Image (cartoon, rainbow, N blue to C red):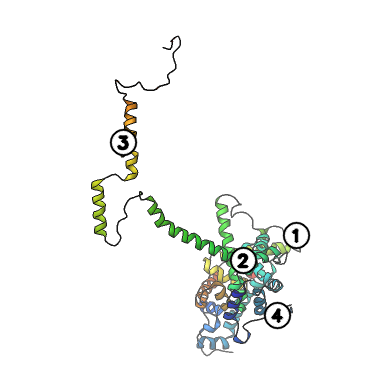
Amino acid sequence: MKPADGNHFTEKQIVAALVDAADLSTERRDHLDHCDHCRQALTDAKTQLARMGTLAKAHTPGPMRPVRLDAQATTALQQRPWRSGLAWAAAAAALIAIVWSGPWERNSLRPAGEPTIAAGDPDLGFMAEVARLVDDPLPDRYRSLVGDGRDQFEEDFMEFIVPPVNGPAPTTSRQPAKGERPC
Amino acid sequence: MDKVVLNRYYRTIMPSPRRNPSPAGPIVAGRAQTRDLVLSAVAGSTPAFHQLADRYQDAVYRLVYHRLRSQMDAEDLTQDVFFKAYRQLHKLKHPERFKSWLFSIALNRIRDHLRREKIKRLFGLVPGESAEPEAHRADPAAPDGFSQLGRRQFWDIVTAIVETMSAGEREVFLLRFIDQLGLAEMAQVLKKGESTVKTQLYRSIAKFRTHPESDRLKGLL
């Protein structure tokens, strides 16, 4: 049968027809219906691609064993909702612990007895901090390290380092040397 | 499986008259449709899942083999695909699309496998790409040497042709003409629009038809 128009399918139109013939324009589809040449070209191309699929199937060895789920796999899956619930609970607990540990850690690092800065009035809190530092620049924790506030200890310590001239001799347990006679 | 999860699942997929199906009983082999088998498998029926596996194992196996050309890897990956499908089955919203969903899992699994192989090759743990693919080696199951030669030639030509395509073009070409999927199914498997799939398919066919090896392929067909 002879088509109404003499324009045969171009290579691009054959490829488009191979993708989806429904996407061709009405005019082109009419041409395809009436043109033996174009229809043959399209059929050949389709056959080649279809045969390739058939051959691929023929050149593929079959699977050796059927797919079977073992009892362990199915049991593990049935236990999963319970397990996942537990996992979620553990994760939530860990998250809460991390969130709460932040402020706790900050508070624990502050030296004992140190007044907390008033959260409501930053100016008042700041001034109180300045006044405290003017009176006593070292916090209690560090004062104890340098011996501040422990007078008795300091006196004993100084006597040990520098013994008094007329005072009693420092108590030492020196052993007499060889040949020396004790008094 | 958790009853609450199952009920929620059924509410989303089942038509209103059958909202609470009874637990899966014995499945009549021939009459059972994929959808019913999927629903039964979701309800915890292992035999139903095994029937699904019997129905689609060959297709999944071929899909894997066409891309890896190794019988052993195809066996292992097919098992993996079905096991993963079993674990994720409750997430499948359209049970009638089980096959496309299964193919999506398979393609992802193949990509993972190839990525791992690439890393192993990088560290010299496996032979390089120059090593002979399993499809080229002697197969005791093949009937004769002529068949083996034909297989080797065929896959050589297909490989040479698809290597000129981009990854996307190659995937649609293999799905359409080697795995013989329809356009709608391909779009579902690749999670792409049908127009995107058509564009890539157009380019891949154009490359196939202009490739010199495609004439050699005609001789084999």
- Residue B88, located in which quarter of the rendered image? bottom right
| Residue on which disc 2 sits | A80
In space, the residues marked 3 and 1 are separated at their CA atoms by: 98 Å
Other-residue count near label 1 (Cα within 10 Å), few / some / many at <14 / 14–19 / ≥20: few
Residue type, numbered disc 2: Arg
Other-residue count near label 2 (Cα within 10 Å), few / some / many at <14 / 14–19 / ≥20: some
Q: Is residue B169 above or below residue A112?
A: below
In space, the residues marked 4 and 2 are separated at their CA atoms by: 28 Å
Residue type, numbered disc 3: Asp
| Residue on which disc 3 sits | A151
Q: Nearer the viewer, mark 2 or mark 3?
A: 3
Residue at 45% of width from left, 9% of height from top?
A: A179
Where disc 4 sits, the SS reads loop
Q: Is residue A14 above or below residue A79?
A: below
Q: Is residue A70 visible?
A: no
User: Which quadrant, please, contains the C terminus of chain B?
Assistant: bottom right
Where disc 3 sits, the SS reads helix
In space, the residues marked 4 and 3 are separated at their CA atoms by: 96 Å
| Residue on which disc 4 sits | B32
Other-residue count near label 3 (Cα within 10 Å), few / some / many at <14 / 14–19 / ≥20: few
Marking on residue B140: 1
In space, the residues marked 2 and 3 are separated at their CA atoms by: 68 Å
Circles 2, 3 touching at the beta carbon (< 8 Å): no
In space, the residues marked 2 and 1 are separated at their CA atoms by: 42 Å
Mark 1 vs mark 4: same chain? yes
Residue type, numbered disc 4: Ala
Residue at 70% of width from left, 62% of height from top?
A: B149
